[in-house]
Amino acid sequence: MYSLYTLMYTAFTFNVNSVYNEPMIKLQSNMLCAKKAYHHGELRESLLEAAEALLEKDGPAGLSLRKVGRQLGVTPGAPYRHFEDKDALLAALATEGFQKLRAVMLADQEGAPDGKERLRRAGVGYLQFASAHPELFRLMFGWMPARDVPGLCEAGDAAFAALQGVLEGCEEEGLLSRSVSEAGLLAWSAVHGAAFLSIDDRLKLEEPAPDSECILNMMHDSIWSGIGKR
Amino acid sequence: MYSLYTLMYTAFTFNVNSVYNEPMIKLQSNMLCAKKAYHHGELRESLLEAAEALLEKDGPAGLSLRKVGRQLGVTPGAPYRHFEDKDALLAALATEGFQKLRAVMLADQEGAPDGKERLRRAGVGYLQFASAHPELFRLMFGWMPARDVPGLCEAGDAAFAALQGVLEGCEEEGLLSRSVSEAGLLAWSAVHGAAFLSIDDRLKLEEPAPDSECILNMMHDSIWSGIGKR
DNA sequence: TGTACATCAGTGAACGCGCGTTCACTGATGTAC
DNA sequence: TGTACATCAGTGAACGCGCGTTCACTGATGTAC
């Protein structure tokens, strides 16, 4: 005869292998008030998620491996099964951040009528990302890991390359009045600066504070006058 | 008869009151190998200086009141005579930073032929400040004190007001194609963004990396095409 | 000019805290037979 | 299908550390007389 415990585990295993790959373990333990599962199942992902949440809530000074573990109901040693040390977690966070930033810049490119509009959309994505994850954004751009981490730099470069790609498109359409690199310097600086000023709440524009798209729109024509043909 | 000790103190007092207000105490103790002075004399200023140096060397995570005290040869309690707590020191650092930033933007305005050139010079100052004090610059813009600190916000606003003033000058000269606030949004964002990207070393422009003035010059025409009349 | 004394700046020892990290361990998993 | 066993993920206790902050103290300063 199977013990209750074994049955639970069977159920759990079935669930994670099923089409819904949400971990059902919390539900199970709520339902049965049973002993908590020994294996978490998706600890690495959960650590990253919880770490980002904590980072956004308490800032970089308030983020500790122990707190993250505590939040997931896991002992202080557990994260070390998945990350060499704290820096490795932070680096993974930043790397994922750059990937998301790139994705969000490129998310809405389809169906834009021309390069100018594609540039605008990429900029809106950039600003939206920053205001959705302000502390992560600061980590990505401010923090330097002690040893270097494979993939981090590449992810950062890839995010910039997305912008670069949009501008190259503009150039091919004959829209630019300057070189791609000059245009990139202005466009990236302007959007990056606006992102920082906006998350620092230093842009005293209107009341209530305009959203990311609004802010970008306010700059877009000026940027375009700076780099596009008239 | 005076003791050697009293004589030293007399000498010291004389020196700090003289036209050179460099503290001579280190010199004195070197010369005589005498007992170290009990009163530091300028501890508040020294704490701020040492804190900034430490901040630039080790980043915000490496800055502790104890370290700063240690560096000045002073016990861990001493800083509390001058700052309520660590946050108060950081706030003072940031406030001074904003004052310096404002000063450096306005330092070179005399003798500029027109508004466009004044704007360029203010921008160069901004970038130079950021690259001379990258960690302080990050602190000024990224860090938020727990309780609010009189003077900090004002200092930040005053720095922005300096830029605003330059742009108002441009408008009076009839040089702007946009409102002062739109022009300010673009100009400040662009310069602020370039400052951050440059201290993060994300601007892969040339080898060796161009200096602040160079970077700003590369952007200035684009910015001006964006906000100035042609 | 010299003396007494209130004020103030720094001492030094102590506090409790949360942190990152290590390590011998144990419970669960999944594979070979 | 059932069993033995190697692998692996998490446990829990412990470590040493540096930190921010407090406090009773003392040495130096500068002022009133």
Image (cartoon, coloured by chain):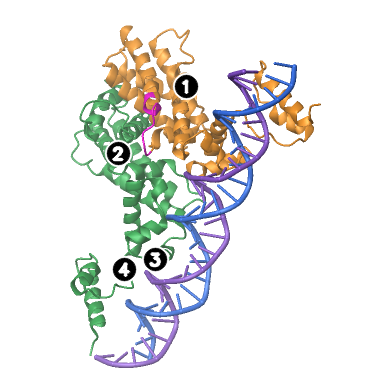
Chain colours: A orange, B green, C purple, D blue
Q: Mark 2 points at which residue?
A: B126
Numbered badge on residue A125: 1
Position of residue D28 measured from the top left corner of the image (x, y, whole percent): 32, 77
> Mark 1: which amino acid?
Gly
Predominant secondary structure, magenta span? loop
Q: Is residue A95 above or below residue B151?
A: above
- Describe the element under mark 2 as helix, strand or loop: helix
> Mark 4: which amino acid?
Gly
Position of residue A72 measured from the top left corner of the image (x, y, whole percent): 62, 37
Indicate which disc, 2 or 3, sits on the residue closer to the N terminus. 3
* Contact? badges 4 and 1 (CB < 8 Å): no
The question of residue B70 being in magenta is answered with: no
Q: Residue at x 40, y 21 (%)?
A: A220
Q: Disc 4 versus disc 1: distance between alpha carbons? A: 53 Å
The quarter of the picture where the C terminus of chain B appears is: top left
Indicate which disc, 3 or 4, sits on the residue closer to the N terminus. 4
Would you say B21 lies left or right of A217 here? left
Q: Name the residue under label 3.
A: B75
Closer to the eye: label 2 or 3: 3
* Contact? badges 1 and 2 (CB < 8 Å): no
- Describe the element under mark 1 as helix, strand or loop: helix
* Residue that lies at the very extreme toward the right in this rendered image: A1
* Part of the protein shown in magenta: A146-154
Q: State the residue in front, B44 or B18.
A: B44
Q: Mark 4 points at which residue?
A: B41
Indicate which disc, 2 or 4, sits on the residue closer to the N terminus. 4
Q: In this view, does B136 lie above or below A9?
A: below
Q: State the residue in front, A139 or A173.
A: A139
